[in-house]
């Protein structure tokens, strides 16, 4: 195919984005060229800044603009509650839900011997040091409800159990708006096991 | 939602891409940050270059790195055949199909009085000057098979008909691999009207 070298480089480079193949990359490049050049330049700028300057918070390992992230620096958040998650996307999801006011610890992965991901890769030594002084009263282990997520949760419980009084997992059960008919058996079993008395409130 | 300002800027800026909403923008930003920072920086670079430096070929109006595009500069292409298309994406499609060795003229749009797009916006004055000397023997008007595309084709025929001996439209009919059962009536009518004798070759 004959095209300008610059346009072809752009189409190739756009395919680093997840879910973007040659066809959508071409559509994106042409759309930017035709009507969105200033916005495209702006995207190039913030992208370069983000790739160069976003680092990991030295306390919780979430992404941060400075040495410490906004949550860790916020005096209104409760540092005695710690939510341990697999990825920054999980922090997004929990913050978006609202209602959680504790701190986080981001592992950037889960234990996976096959992929060579062990406790050090997840920064679990840092997690252990953080809870050592007894300042964390509850650790919510919010790893995913997958086999690897459960195994990681189990490991974390053994690692920090002596220093943290309460170690909890997220409740499993019916999703809000979910219908029994379309819910898988494992979820229904968990929902039955965790059933709660209807109160008269 | 609490996040780093730089990450949020990146998520916002990515939404300029067609088909990218807040959720996929977040997924893209996090994927780049986690594993693809060098590729992300490279994307930022080629994106900035493309937005700044890609211009329109002064002959055919397709995108080009220099004053004239690769097709217009190629001595092996036949300048007496001119394919007139609505967009650079159409050039991609035709070049990808292979088998066309003439030149192009890119209108970057189609006539649309409602949107205020007239002949000048499409550079049709330049098209008229280009064919004026009689050097173009065939013009293939490859506007889309839509109402506006047909109207634009009609206008072009009136505009350059006196200077170009052959003015053609792309054949309409069954797409290759298409099945009658799933083909719309308009296409079937065109395919019937344009039917060709089975030769014994």
Image (cartoon, coloured by chain):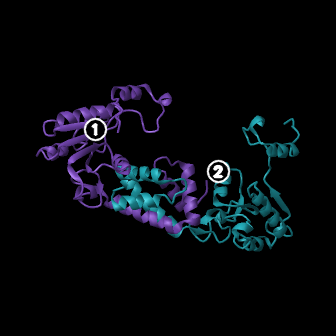
Chain colours: A cyan, B purple
The Cα–Cα distance between marks 2 and 1, rounded to whole angstroms, is 43 Å
Asked whether the beta carbons under mark 2 and mark 1 sit within 8 Å of each other, the answer is: no
User: x, y (%) of residue A55?
Assistant: 58, 69
Quarter assignment of residue B49: bottom left
Measured along the vertical axis of the image, is residue A182 above or below residue A123?
Answer: above
Q: Residues within 10 Å of mark 2 (few under 14, many from 20)?
A: few
Q: Residues within 10 Å of mark 1 (few under 14, many from 20)?
A: few
Q: What residue do we see at 57% from left, 50% from top?
A: B23
User: x, y (%) of residue A82?
Assistant: 75, 62
Q: Which residue is mark 1?
A: B117
Secondary element under disc 1, as helix, strand or loop, is loop
Q: What residue do we see at 34% from left, 34% from top?
A: B199
Is residue B9 rendered to the left or right of residue A1? right
User: x, y (%) of residue A58?
Assistant: 65, 72
Q: Which mark is residue A96?
A: 2
**Chain letter of the residue carrying label 1:** B
Badge nearest the viewer, 2 or 1: 1
Is residue B162 rendered to the left or right of residue A178? left
- Regarding residue B4, the answer to whether it shows in the image is no
Q: Which mark is residue B140?
A: none
């Amino acid at each position: 195919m004959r095209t300008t070298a610059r346009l072809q480089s752009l189409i190739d480079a756009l395919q680093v984005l997840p879910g973007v193949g040659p066809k959508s990359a071409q559509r994106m490049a042409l759309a930017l060229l035709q009507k969105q050049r200033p916005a495209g330049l702006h995207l190039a700028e913030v992208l370069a800044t983000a790739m160069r300057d976003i680092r990991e918070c030295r306390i919780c390992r979430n992404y941060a603009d400075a040495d410490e992230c906004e949550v860790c620096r916020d005096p209104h958040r409760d540092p005695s509650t710690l939510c341990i998650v697999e990825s920054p996307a999980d922090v997004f999801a929990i913050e978006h839900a609202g209602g959680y006011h504790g701190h986080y610890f981001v592992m950037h992965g889960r234990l996976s011997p096959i992929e060579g991901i062990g406790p050090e890769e997840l920064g679990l030594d840092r997690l252990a040091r953080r809870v050592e002084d007894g300042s964390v009263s509850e650790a919510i282990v919010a790893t995913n409800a997958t086999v690897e997520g459960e195994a990681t949760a189990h490991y974390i419980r053994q690692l920090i159990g002596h220093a943290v009084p309460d170690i909890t997992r997220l409740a499993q059960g019916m999703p809000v708006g979910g219908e029994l008919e379309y819910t898988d058996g494992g979820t229904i079993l968990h929902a039955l096991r965790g059933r709660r008395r209807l109160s008269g409130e």
